[in-house]
Image (cartoon, coloured by chain):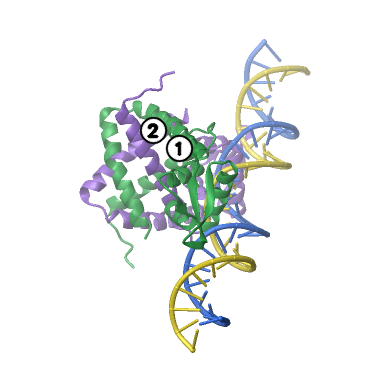
Chain colours: A purple, B green, C blue, D yellow
Amino acid sequence: MNDTFDPRLTGLAQEFREALRLGVYMFRRLDPEGDLTAAQLSLLSMVSGGGLRVGDIAKNLGIKVPSATEQIIKLERAGLVTRQADPDDSRAVQVAITQAGAGAVESANQRRNAMVAELLQGLSNQEIEHLAAALPVIAKLNSSFQN
Amino acid sequence: MNDTFDPRLTGLAQEFREALRLGVYMFRRLDPEGDLTAAQLSLLSMVSGGGLRVGDIAKNLGIKVPSATEQIIKLERAGLVTRQADPDDSRAVQVAITQAGAGAVESANQRRNAMVAELLQGLSNQEIEHLAAALPVIAKLNSSFQN
DNA sequence: CCTTGACTATTAGGGTGCCTAACTATTAGG
DNA sequence: CCTAATAGTTAGGCACCCTAATAGTCAAGG
């Protein structure tokens, strides 16, 4: 096993971990007044593009199936999604967003995006470019981390 | 209240929020085998620079005092920190790292940095540059968010 | 002094969100 | 058919955060 790396990478790793910690902080505090928790909004946004099976939702969210089930049941009780047996495979369950769910996603996203956009307004153009360039890199890191 | 923003900012905000969610995921799952949880390592790293009071720790971590107390008690039971009344103000409690605690921080940081560095190795030079340029921006966003 | 109000930390109780293990129901292959 | 694999749910548990209530200490004014 190779555990020696370019020292610059190790330094960047430390810095990246620190940024992750700050990100956790921000993520947690974004729009605490809203009706939807961050986890619920992530799930709802995901199904708002079209019905998905529980397993797909779990995989896309990077959580285990029982954790997805738990959130889905909460959302169903709140009237924001529906659950129906997949006609092609009755083991599977199709989760679809309701009209109320779509409205909730819309307003929650607006509120949160407005809060973040306000933060972003405090950045220079160059800082915004740096941030925008890095976001796909973070997404890529996450997908390689999933494996 | 102004809730209209440059639409590019709103799009970026959406993308940034998604990156935050992914970051939370990575942060939590990094080194799940280690002795320290992510939250404990954050706290321990913080006091490793010198003793701090509970309130300061909570503020620096962005959590409430009772949550900090809870973590500190766990770490104390594990022998990684000590708690002593502040000689200047016996309401306050000084939290200091032990030798075992310092060792735990050291090895946990190494393991986690190695894991992240390995992820970073999968990036191109340009991607690494983009990431490195964005990390200070994230730190800046966080500090303006604190207010 | 000594009381009152502010401050520091802890305790008690609660909630979210994730996990693994065990189970049920369904599908598909030999 | 029967068995193995697959999809989801249920049950139980843990990490980590919160608010409200409490105990102890400090500091300032009467």
Chain for disc number 2: A
User: Is residue B54 depicted above or below D11 in this figure?
Assistant: below
Q: Are marks 2 and 1 in contact (CB under 8 Å)?
A: yes
Q: What's the chain of the residue with tag 1?
A: B
Q: Which mark is residue A26?
A: none
**Would you say residue B91 is visible in this rendering?**
yes
Hey, what amino acid is under mark 1? Met
Q: Secondary structure at mark 1?
A: helix
Q: CA gap, disc 2 to disc 1?
A: 9 Å
Counting the numbered discs, the total is: 2
Above or below: residue B92 compared with residue B49:
below
Type of residue at label 2? Leu
The N terminus of chain B, quarter of image: bottom left
Residue at (35% x, 24% y) in the render: A5
Question: Where on the picture, by quarter, is residue B35?
Answer: top right
Residue B142's place in the image compared with B88, above or below, is above
**x, y percent for residue B90:** 52, 62
| Residue shown at 26% from the left, 47% from the top | A128
Q: Quadrant of residue A122?
A: bottom left
Crowd around label 1: few <14 · some 14–19 · many ≥20 (10 Å):
many
Write the residue at 29% across / 45% down.
Answer: B136
Task: Where is residue A124? Give x, y as percent.
Answer: 22, 51
Mark 2 burial class by Cα count in 10 Å: few <14, some 14-19, many 20+:
many
Query: Which residue lies under the disc numbered 2?
Result: A141
In which quadrant of the rendered image does the C terminus of chain B lie?
Answer: bottom left
| Near-viewer residue (B64 or D13) | B64
Q: In the rendered image, which residue does mark 1 sit on?
A: B26
Q: Quadrant of residue A94?
A: top right
* B93 to the left or right of B3: right
Secondary structure category for the residue under label 2: helix
Rendered location of residue A89, percent (x, y): 62, 31
Give how far across and how far down residue A50 sits, in percent: 48, 42
